Image (cartoon, rainbow, N blue to C red):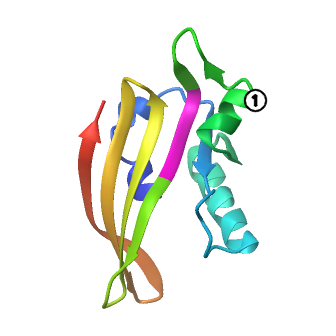
Amino acid sequence: MDSIMEQYDAISSDMEYVAIDMSNFEEVDESDKEEILSYFKAKYNVDVMVATFEQLKEKGLYDPETMSLGGVLLRIEKVDFKFNNNIFFEGSKYRSGLGAVGVEVTVHYKENKWKSKEVKMTWIS
């Protein structure tokens, strides 16, 4: 997810929070989710929450006049486990209809750590 966050820095400028859509994190247990949230809070020094786009709207965190969020929303849309300790996933970082980016990432597990092996921006708005 950090690989997605690092894409297109302009989207992240002056962000008030990071929202992570974990609605499809079926294989991730609660302690792992907490670790993800803690990591993002420490790294970006903003509020970090679990929320979908709809939940952000319900909380009043989406401005319909500017059609944008006060923070960024990270989502993982597709995960594919490959051989040789590789995982491929597609995700996105969203701030507004004119401030979003899609990313394909391959991560590799080596020496007890997951590291980005390849990051490719697939679309931008």
For the point 51% across and 17% down, which residue is it? 67
- Residue 92 in the image: state x and y as whole percent: 41, 47
Residue position for label 1: 59
Answer left or right for 104 relative to 63.
left
Q: Check the image and report above or below for 125 versus 40.
A: above
Q: Which residues are magenta?
A: 70-75
Label 1 sits on what residue type? Lys
- Residue 10 in the image: state x and y as whole percent: 37, 30
Rendered image quadrant of residue 64? top right
Rendered image quadrant of residue 57? top right
For the point 62% across and 30% down, which residue is it? 16
Q: Quadrant of the C terminus?
A: top left
Predominant secondary structure in magenta? strand
Magenta stretch contains residue 60: no
Q: Nearer the viewer, residue 26 or 98?
A: 26
Q: How many marks?
A: 1
Q: Nearer the viewer, residue 111 or 83?
A: 83
Q: Secondary structure at mark 1?
A: loop
- Residue 83 in the image: state x and y as whole percent: 31, 89
For the point 56% across and 8% down, which residue is it? 65
Crowdedness near tag 1: few (<14), some (14–19) or many (≥20) residues, C-alpha within 10 Å = few
- Residue 32 in the image: state x and y as whole percent: 67, 72
Q: Check the image and report above or below for 36 versus 49.
A: below
